[in-house]
Image (cartoon, grey):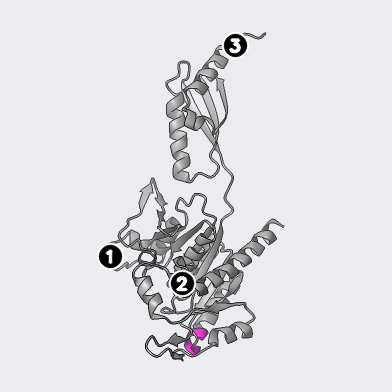
Amino acid sequence: MRAMSSDDAVKQAVLQAIPPELSGMVRSVSMRDGVATVIADAGGLGRSAAAQLQRELEEAASPVAGVNEVRVALMADKVQRQIVVIGSGKGGVGKSTLTANLAVALAKSGRKVGVVDADIYGPSQSVLLNAADTKLRAEGKMLIPHESEYGVKMVSMGQLVEAGKAIAWRGPMVGSALGQLMEADWGETDLLLVDLPPGTGDVQLTMLQKFKPTGAVVVSTPQDLALIDATRAIDLFRQAQVPIVGIVENMSGYQCPSCGEVSEPFGQGGAEAAATAIEVPFLGHVPLAMEIRIASDDGKPPAASEGALGAPFAEIAAQLQQWLGQSAMNYTG
């Protein structure tokens, strides 16, 4: 039988020094010339949790007699994260409300979802997801997303600046801010919904060029002016070779709470007709409803409930989920 070398003895001491709650993550320990190398499995951990694991392993092994240096190597499976941008050619069409509710509906179905509020100048996701009183924290230079009560992680400029304060930034600063939001510590989040600002400016171009979205959902109201702008947004996505998931018609029909009569203050079916004309999928209608507006202002997304108001969002989310599944199959195939 081979006698145990001094390195073997120190290795055994290192293994014994590692706390039981961490030992299951350790895949191997080696010793050479006073250097202890610990290889651990950090699969499923976010960056901050992985950094904490590394620190704890170093602190456990460092005091062992014979150890002059500790090197920790972490192994982790890379999360195949999909990115879907929610855009529109103009403001006021309900894009942010749709984003928040799609995220909540997808989270209810078991998807690990994050929301990036990329509307730098006019962030609203912190209100819609009931996080207006929260502030984002950072570890080093990396933001830690807020975990909303609806199972959706989120980052928003609304959580970084004083409420009501104008953000007067030029293009490079906006691009830098977007990068910090996108590159937050998302952990196991496998889908990011990005609430884009209206139009086709710096944020959109940075997003399309740097982060290469998996697909784009375009929101419009039924009237012609909104549809013209929505078509421009679709053209931008196509130029950037971002697949169009489809068009959503928001504020589609209004039911009077007093008499029950349905009217169409913004017209009817315009977005569906436009989708057919430009050959992109139509994902569905969301009604113009006072209850949606009130719930949104209160940070209570209708998609979180089982009521009728949540049904349109659930149906659109199901179509998006199906599209994402096909996209993932095409990617791996």
Q: From the viewer's perspective, is residue 222 above or below residue 320?
A: below
Q: Residue furthest right?
A: 333
What amino acid is labelled 1 in the image? Ala
Residue under numbered circle 2:
307
Labels 3 and 1: the sequence-earlier one: 3
Q: Which mark is residue 301?
A: none
Labels 3 and 2: the sequence-earlier one: 3
Residue under numbered circle 3:
4
Residue at 58 percent of width and 47 percent of height: 78
Q: From the viewer's perspective, is residue 132 above or below residue 233?
A: above
Neighbour tally class for label 1: few under 14, some 14-19, many 20 plus, Cα within 10 Å: few
Q: From the viewer's perspective, is residue 185 above or below residue 199?
A: above
Q: Which mark is residue 163?
A: 1
Residue at mark 2 to residue at mark 1: CA–CA distance: 32 Å
Q: In the figure, is residue 156 to the left or right of 267?
A: left
Residue at mark 3 to residue at mark 2: CA–CA distance: 68 Å
Neighbour tally class for label 3: few under 14, some 14-19, many 20 plus, Cα within 10 Å: few
What segment is highlighted magenta in the picture? Answer: 223-228
**What is the quadrant of the C terminus in the image?**
bottom right
Q: Is residue 226 magenta?
A: yes
Q: Is residue 224 magenta?
A: yes
Residue at mark 3 to residue at mark 1: CA–CA distance: 65 Å
Query: Closer to the camera, 328 or 318?
Result: 318
